[in-house]
Image: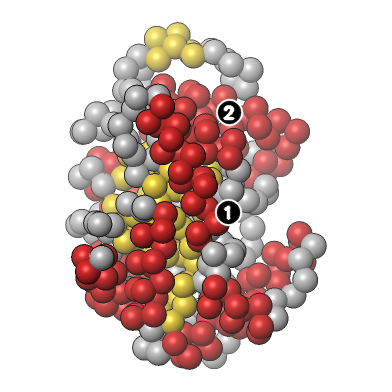
Amino acid sequence: MTVELGLETFGDVSVREDGTPETAAQVLRHVVEQGVLADEVGVDALGVGEHHRPDFAVSAPDVVLAGLATRTTRIRLGSAVTVLSSDDPIRVFERFSTIDALSGGRAEVVLGRGSFTESFPLFGYDLRDYETLFSEKLDLFSRLLEERPVSWEGTTRPPLVQQEVWPRTGSGRLATWIAVGGSPQSVVRAASYRLPLMLAVIGGPAERFAPFADLYRRLLADGGGPVLPVAVHSPGHVAETDELAATQLYPHFKANRDRIGAERGWGPLTPQDYRAEIAQGALYVGSPETVARKIAATVRSLGLSRFDLKYANGPMPHGQLMRSIELYGTQVAPRVRELLAEG
């Protein structure tokens, strides 16, 4: 099996080594440095997320990606995810086709509804229209991917009549994924639009998503379409040893998890929960060998074409993030491919 190995970040507002918080502006500059390093150490793809809240610095990932397009040479640059429901499909296409041009054809967009809803009131959308907004905007975006004059009509915007959208991509098709968090209906939608599927596995064992991957492939086959990639996105951290990685990540992962949990009614993360998630769940934490073996097992069990590690999880210092990226590119990725080649 062959697999692509990527990285993702939401631009979590981090702390310095002395524990004092960084400014959002400095975090954004750090994200660019991290992307440049990922490119240098051979990582296949970098995804940058979108949030509109104080604990994440990136609210405009396309702007960050445009900067990275001019600082990198080979890594693919994408979103993680673009919250299409509260954005304009035409502007999304224009922005990412521009990144595609600046990067020499390395842009990709990952479309999703997002697990945070701050963008809806911010941009004047009603959460009661949550499903309609995504459905109609995805339908329009799928038409834009044909890169021909488009006619479209729905309820969320005025109709289009033979409208052309620029710039077009050099390849004639903007690389596009649909991100799914665990809903069979979302899997069916991805298959119906013949778009690659990215599964967000953020808790529990990855193997529980096998029915979703199987459903997606079965729907593609029943429709007579080509085989398309399936990917997984999961959080993790790499350090020289298992214990160092777990120790480094814990306070930052807990801070992030407990802050979001307080908003959503979850209890605080315990050390036991954390260690269980590393041992049997969705946290890919440890030495390069440990993380590589867990990734390879996930790739095999789900038949993946790509695995993305969300390497920033809470306010971890920039230096530790850079070391994790370096180990992921130079040791984890080659070892995953060795393990898969061994069968």
Q: Residue at x 30, y 32 (%)?
A: 226
Instruction: For marks 1 and 2, give the CA distance.
Output: 21 Å
Residue 266 placement (x, y as % from top left): 76, 66
Who comes first in sequence, dot 1 or dot 2?
A: 1
Q: Residue at x 71, y 41 (%)?
A: 121
Residue named by callout 1: 51
Point out the image quarter for the N terminus.
bottom left
Residue 205 placement (x, y as % from top left): 54, 64
- Visible in this render: residue 78? yes
Q: Which amino acid type is marked by label 2?
A: Ser
Residue 135: numbered disc: 2
48 with respect to 51 (left or right): left
Res. 171 image quadrant: top left
Secondary element at tag 1: loop
Q: Residue at x 36, y 53 (%)?
A: 304
Q: Along the line of sight, which residue is nearer the eye, 337 or 250?
A: 337
Q: Is residue 16 above or below residue 209?
A: below
Residue at the far top: name it. Answer: 161
Q: Is residue 210 above or below residue 343?
A: above
- Visible in this render: residue 61? no
Q: Residue at x 31, y 23 (%)?
A: 147
Q: Is residue 84 above or below residue 306?
A: above
**Which mark lies nearer to you, 1 or 2?**
2
Please rate how many residues cluster around mark 1, counting C-alpha atoms within 10 Å: few if below 14, some from 14 to 19, many from 20: many
86 with respect to 215 (left or right): right
Residue 262 placement (x, y as % from top left): 77, 66
Res. 308 image quadrant: bottom left
